[in-house]
């Protein structure tokens, strides 16, 4: 996931929120049945809280985005975002992309809730955001990933992304990042 310094800096100047507001209550994890079917749909500001809560369950390394960051990402005109939902309409995954000023597509974050992983939802979400970028005439996609996050790197490599640069101490805990790129030709 990307470290969104500009957005965070902007929101850090806001007054502090009460503790109860900042910490969503954990939801019980139910093991999904083998035949569970999923749809991929657009992700909008209507799903702000659902998405924010899901992100807390996907990113347990202290790098989850704040609610305000999601509010920005889901209302920005350059946002290209999708969610994976069960047939019951519960969101179990999401991807958020931004069309950057240089016209690259930037995948800022993608996550699938732990109990729904390895069902090709991460892959489907990535393919959908790439399609959304294509429709906006984006030809190059970039993303950042933790150097230790081999699961995510595998998903990206399988989809044709290649590491082009190491980003020393990119993450706030000092972890390195990798910049990965894919051409959409
Ligand atoms: C990364 C993440 C989104 C992948 O989602 P997913 O739905 O489980 O991934 P997929 O099922 O689409 O995986 C597609 C392929 O990638 C590879 N892959 C995915 N997870 C893997 C893992 N843990 N170990 C090894 N390979 C893995 C496999 O080749 C897999 O295909 P296969 O299951 O047929 O072998 C998910 O693990 C996640 O939410 N992680 C926490 C948040 C995160 O790290 N996000 C990325 C930030 S950059």
Image (cartoon, grey):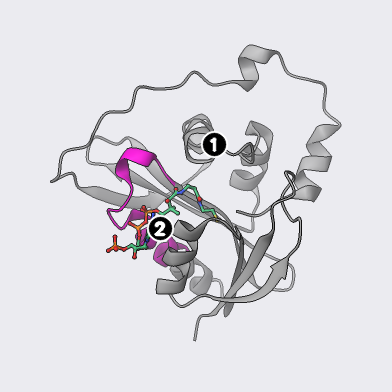
| Magenta-drawn segment | 112-129
Left or right, 73 with reference to 119? right
Q: Which residue is mark 1?
A: 60
Which one is earlier in the sequence, the residue at label 2 or at label 1?
A: 1
* Coordinates of residue 172 in the picture (x, y in percent): 75, 45
Which mark is nearer the camera, 2 or 1? Answer: 1
x 82%, y 22%: residue: 15
Ligand 1 is within 8 Å of the C-beta of the residue at disc 2? yes
* Coordinates of residue 134 in the picture (x, y in percent): 50, 74
The dot on residue 48 is: none
Element carrying mark 1? loop
Q: Quadrant of ligand 1?
A: bottom left
Q: Which residue is mark 2?
A: 125
Q: Is the C-beta separation of discs 2 and 1 under 8 Å? A: no
Which image quadrant is residue 87 in?
top left
Q: Nearer the viewer, residue 32 or 132?
A: 32
**Label 1: how many residues lie within 10 Å, few (<14), some (14-19) or many (20+)?**
few
* Coordinates of residue 8 in the picture (x, y in percent): 77, 41
Q: Name, please, the residue furthest toward the left.
A: 35
Element carrying mark 2? helix
């Amino acid at each position: 996931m990307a470290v969104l310094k500009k957005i965070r800096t902007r929101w850090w100047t806001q007054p502090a929120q009460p503790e109860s507001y900042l910490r969503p209550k954990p939801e019980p994890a139910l093991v999904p049945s083998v035949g569970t079917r999923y749809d991929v749909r657009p992700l909008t500001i209507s799903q702000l809280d659902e998405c924010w809560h899901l992100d807390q369950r996907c990113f347990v390394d202290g790098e989850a985005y704040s609610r305000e960051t999601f509010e920005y990402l889901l209302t920005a005109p350059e946002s290209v975002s999708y969610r994976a939902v069960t047939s019951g309409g519960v969101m179990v995954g999401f991807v958020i992309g931004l069309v950057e000023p240089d016209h690259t597509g930037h995948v800022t974050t993608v996550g699938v809730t732990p109990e729904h992983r390895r069902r090709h939802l991460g892959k489907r979400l990535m393919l959908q955001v790439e399609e959304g970028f294509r429709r906006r005439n984006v030809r190059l996609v970039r993303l950042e990933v933790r150097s230790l996050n081999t699961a995510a790197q595998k998903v990206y490599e399988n989809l044709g992304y290649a590491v082009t640069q190491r980003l020393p101490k990119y993450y706030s805990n000092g972890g390195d990042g990798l910049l990965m790129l894919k051409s959409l030709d």
